[in-house]
């Protein structure tokens, strides 16, 4: 494996709908290249890329993993990513580290929801791509139907560079359309055979379509083609590589991963037509500029994935964009401004590693124990001012209130939540100041619950997840005068405080205001801070349902005092009694948070989504086209209480195609029937 030559490196990320066979394909490629000595199976939990116990238990990828496959003098770094939408953050990370995407299609299912989602992700990140139609050995499979579906969905750039020799269990080989040769699969590879007569016409038509598509990307080649000259394989490969790089061509190949059929031919296609690191501009920097590829330039590397290992410590996977990293180096973290000593570089091979002497520009490696380096951080050598752009993680929208199962778990809760969020930056941990809850936000219910299970398994900390409390507030709607008199005499010095207060509503968001309107010394001013303090203490929990009271003005305008018995404590208690006297007269009301959602959905689901929002007491603000055909963005306002689990509900309504963003807008009064329910719930909770 030549890892000293950047031009011999191919960084590819496998993306697909969950269950399309990415991990099986990674396993097949690792097996045929000798990276592993036995062919693992997802069902048996022994694949090289799905090594996490949670992945083994569930039979699906949760983390991205990197498996380098040596092939004909090249190194193909395969980045296997999860297909389940809750873990799409790792797809984003994988796309940053890769130079091309390989979109895997299940031949039995065709284009699925996840296919559309990852295709758009690849589009938005402007990555070249190759399509693999996998599971060609399954029953009721038609390669022609799948190719036609791909063209209908993704356009004429879809261009098969192979024709399968047979469908379903008769998938016995492929015809290479670049030179028209056929190869039959064998136990240890493939062997050349004549093109079957029954396929001759199909092959001729397909070769002509491919040649048309490829020649159109190269003026010189197009001229030869129009003049009737026979195009050589080398010419076609060169033009195809340029067409793939520019996004004008999406080559299609066919595999049956669990039998390793087509894995070698896929590796040939990757090395022949997908770009090397030096063929593409580097991913954009934070200021939008691009870094020119330079193997001998200053070092610029970015951490694209962090793993929290309870035994090894932090494991940081990084992609080197420019420069060559020797075995021991000091680099500056552009995020923190600190210098970091890096040593002991290894090439990732699933969960294992291979010692790396040097890591050249374009390659992927990992180091351990970089405690002050996080996912997305850029590491540079002295003299470089470059900083890579952020990974642009999706916004987490499924929130859970986290609590410890025991006191011992409480002592470790903050630390382990921080570590799991560092490992997966599509998770967010925060404290809700209004409710006092610790919130863990993820991309879906499975994302949050699997993350808590990983915390339990990795760190031995048991955490519980509940629906977060809605941060309701209380306020008043009427101006009232209230009176509070605190008088106590029990021998010796007594307690006396008397205050009259006008309570009035303020505009939304104005907060609490205390005003001194005392005339003629009815209450000495030295006691007014105590009056204000008593009011503030009362408004922490409103008398209606126990929510904080906001947007209220309290004006002390009269009262009495006693030269001996009055004190700060007396007037603080008098203020409390004034609240008791006037609060319920002031027409108190509960306020609920209103959020604005921008819901991106297929046009076919628009009616269902709008109807569902209406049922949640929401209303539509407007509708705009999405950045791809057949979809719209519906903007709505809806009470937060009604969309606590909207991430799950929208996925159900749209069969997984919908997504949304959310932002707080304002507080507004709840309807009477909702207020009655909240008051009753509070009374029941308080006994």
Image (spheres, rainbow, N blue to C red):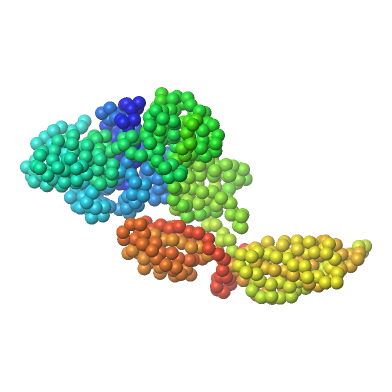
Q: Residue at x 34, y 35 (%)?
A: 277
| Residue 587 falls in image quadrant | bottom right
Measured as percent of width and height from the top left, residue 508 is found at 61, 67
| Residue 511 falls in image quadrant | bottom right
Measured as percent of width and height from the top left, residue 64 is found at 40, 40
Q: Nearer the viewer, residue 490 or 180?
A: 180
Number of numbered callouts drawn:
0
Q: Residue at x 58, y 48 (%)?
A: 404
Quadrant housing the N terminus: top left
User: Which residue of the protein is positioned furthest toward the right in this rendering?
Assistant: 492
Measured as percent of width and height from the top left, residue 449 is found at 47, 49
Q: Residue at x 57, y 70 (%)?
A: 669
Q: Nearer the viewer, residue 100 or 438?
A: 100
Quadrant housing the C terminus: bottom right
Q: Is residue 611 left or right of residue 432?
A: left
Q: Look at the image and tell me whether residue 468 can be seen.
A: yes
Q: Residue at x 50, y 59 (%)?
A: 663
User: Which residue of the protein is positioned furthest toward the left in this rendering?
Assistant: 197
Measured as percent of width and height from the top left, residue 148 is found at 20, 53
Q: Is residue 462 left or right of residue 489?
A: left
Q: Is residue 592 left or right of residue 321?
A: right
* Residue 3 versus residue 621 in the image, above or below: above
Q: Look at the image and tell me whether residue 573 can be seen.
A: no
């Amino acid at each position: 494996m030549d890892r000293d030559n950047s031009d011999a490196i191919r960084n590819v990320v496998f993306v697909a709908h969950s269950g399309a066979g990415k991990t099986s394909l990674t396993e097949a490629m690792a097996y045929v290249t000798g990276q592993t000595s036995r062919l693992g199976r997802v069902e048996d939990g022994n694949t090289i890329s799905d090594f996490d116990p949670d992945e083994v238990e569930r039979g699906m990828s949760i983390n991205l993993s990197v498996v380098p496959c040596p092939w004909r003098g090249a190194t193909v770094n395969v980045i296997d990513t999860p297909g389940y939408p809750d873990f799409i953050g790792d797809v984003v990370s994988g796309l940053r580290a890769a130079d091309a995407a390989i979109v895997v299609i299940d031949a039995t299912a065709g284009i699925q929801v996840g296919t559309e989602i990852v295709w758009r992700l690849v589009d938005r990140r402007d990555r070249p791509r190759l399509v693999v139609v996998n599971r060609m050995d399954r029953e009721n499979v038609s390669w022609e139907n799948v190719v036609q579906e791909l063209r209908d969905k993704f356009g004429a750039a879809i261009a098969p560079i192979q024709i399968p020799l047979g469908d379903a269990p008769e998938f016995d080989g492929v015809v290479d359309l670049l030179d028209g040769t056929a190869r039959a699969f064998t136990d240890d590879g493939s062997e050349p055979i004549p093109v079957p007569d029954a396929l001759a016409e199909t092959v001729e038509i397909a070769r002509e379509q491919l040649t048309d598509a490829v020649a159109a990307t190269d003026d010189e080649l197009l001229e030869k083609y129009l003049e009737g000259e026979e195009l050589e394989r080398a010419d076609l490969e060169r033009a195809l590589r340029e067409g793939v790089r520019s996004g004008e061509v999406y080559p299609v190949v066919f595999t049956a991963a669990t039998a390793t059929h087509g894995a070698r031919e896929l590796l040939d296609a990757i090395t022949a037509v997908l770009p090397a690191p030096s063929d593409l501009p580097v991913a954009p920097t934070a200021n939008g500029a691009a870094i020119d590829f330079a193997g001998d330039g200053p070092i610029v590397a970015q951490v694209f994935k962090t793993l929290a290992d309870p035994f090894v410590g932090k494991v940081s996977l990084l992609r080197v964009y420019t420069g060559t990293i020797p075995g021991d180096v000091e680099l500056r973290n552009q995020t923190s401004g600190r210098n970091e000593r890096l040593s002991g570089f290894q090439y990732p091979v699933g969960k294992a590693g291979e010692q790396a002497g040097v890591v050249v520009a374009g390659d992927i490696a990992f180091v351990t124990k970089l405690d002050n380096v996080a996912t997305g951080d850029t590491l540079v050598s002295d003299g470089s001012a470059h900083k890579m752009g952020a990974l642009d993680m999706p916004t987490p929208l499924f929130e859970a209130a986290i609590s410890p199962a025991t006191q011992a778990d409480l002592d470790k809760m903050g630390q382990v939540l921080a570590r799991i969020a560092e490992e997966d930056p599509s998770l967010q941990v925060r404290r809700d100041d209004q409710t006092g809850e610790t919130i863990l936000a993820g991309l879906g219910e499975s994302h949050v619950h699997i993350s808590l299970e990983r915390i339990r398994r990795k760190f031995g900390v048991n955490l519980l997840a509940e629906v977060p409390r809605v941060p309701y507030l209380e306020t008043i709607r009427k101006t009232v005068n209230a009176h509070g008199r605190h008088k106590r005499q029990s021998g010796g010095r007594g307690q006396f405080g008397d205050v009259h207060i006008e309570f009035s509503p303020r505009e939304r968001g104005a907060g609490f205001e205390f005003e001194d309107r005392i005339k003629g010394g009815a209450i000495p001013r030295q006691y007014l801070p105590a009056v204000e303090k008593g009011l503030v203490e009362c408004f922490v929990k409103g008398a209606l349902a126990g929510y904080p009271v906001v947007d209220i003005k309290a004006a002390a305008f009269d009262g009495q005092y006693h030269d001996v018995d009055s004190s700060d404590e007396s007037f603080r208690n008098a203020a409390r009694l004034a609240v008791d006297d006037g609060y319920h007269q002031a027409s108190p009301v509960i306020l609920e948070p209103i959020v604005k959602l921008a819901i991106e959905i297929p046009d076919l689901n628009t009616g269902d989504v709008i109807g569902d929002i209406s049922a949640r007491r929401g209303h539509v603000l407007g509708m705009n086209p999405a950045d791809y055909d057949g979809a719209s963005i519906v903007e709505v306002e809806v009470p937060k209480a009604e969309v606590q689990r909207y991430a799950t509900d929208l996925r159900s309504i749209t069969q997984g195609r919908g997504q949304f963003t959310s932002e707080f807008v304002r507080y507004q009064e709840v309807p009477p029937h909702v207020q009655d329910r909240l008051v009753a719930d509070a009374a029941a909770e308080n006994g």
